[in-house]
């Protein structure tokens, strides 16, 4: 990887898209809904994983893949339905003290980087959808937008460069954790 965050060549290795969320809770079902849409759009060879409500379930889906894209809901970081992209820095402080009640994808990946360094993906991108204030009528548009963002992240990885995105601070809150 170069200092600018771009890769020097095209990539064709293993890619996983993992979604966190809960189908029952309206503000937290965005991840699984986006995963369903990505399933329709993804090229062959992209692994899809629904990790449910437990951030720790993400640990079962780490296998030293080149790219891991995690889709989840967030609250309080943008306009309703806005899609936010973060290049996850596993060395950055979490910004709050984690507890067993607040272990989301970010916290699980930080723990995994210490426990299972050989299983960590080369690159982790978070695609978060602002669900605070999101009306049910706007969910479909947010799902399509997030799925398009995930597909763009995959394409950018394969081309060797990432799309720009609004980076979140390490304390970005996810829903349901």
Image (tube, grey):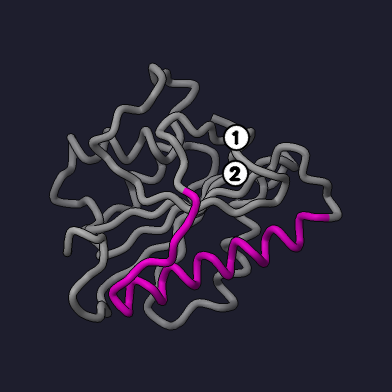
> Relative to 16, does residue 116 appear above or below in the rendering?
above
Q: Name which quarter of the figure residue 143 lies in.
A: bottom right
Total numbered circles: 2
Please, what is the dominant secondary structure of the magenta stretch? helix
Q: Which residues, given as a range, are shown in magenta? A: 138-166
Q: Residue at x 80, y 55 (%)?
A: 138
Q: Residue at x 18, y 42 (%)?
A: 116
> Relative to 174, does residue 3 appear above or below in the rendering?
below
Q: Residues within 10 Å of mark 1 (few under 14, many from 20)?
A: many
Mark 1–mark 2 CB contact (< 8 Å): yes
Question: Picture coordinates of residue 88 (x, y %)?
Answer: 35, 46
- From the viewer's side, name the closer residue of 149 and 58: 149
- From the viewer's side, name the closer residue of 33 and 166: 166
Q: Kindly identify which residue carries mark 1.
A: 175
Question: Picture coordinates of residue 89 (x, y %)?
Answer: 29, 43
Q: Is label 2 in a helix, a strand or a loop?
A: strand
Does the segment drawn in magenta span residue 151? yes
């Amino acid at each position: 990887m170069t200092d600018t965050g771009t890769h020097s060549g095209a990539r064709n290795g293993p890619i996983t898209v993992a979604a966190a969320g809960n189908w029952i809770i309206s503000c937290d079902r965005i991840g699984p809904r986006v995963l369903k849409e990505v399933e329709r759009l993804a090229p062959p060879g992209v692994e899809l994983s629904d990790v449910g409500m437990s951030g720790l379930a993400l640990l079962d889906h780490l296998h030293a893949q080149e790219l891991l894209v995690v889709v989840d809901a967030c609250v309080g970081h943008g306009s309703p339905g806005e899609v936010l992209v973060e290049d996850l820095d596993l060395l950055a402080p979490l910004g709050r003290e984690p507890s067993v009640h607040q272990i989301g994808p970010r916290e699980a990946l930080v723990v995994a980087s210490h426990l299972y360094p050989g299983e960590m993906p080369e690159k982790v991108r978070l695609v978060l959808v602002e669900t605070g204030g999101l009306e049910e009528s706007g969910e479909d548009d947010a799902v399509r937008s997030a799925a398009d963002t995930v597909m763009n992240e995959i394409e950018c990885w394969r081309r060797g460069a990432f799309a720009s995105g609004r980076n979140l601070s390490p304390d970005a809150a996810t829903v349901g954790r």
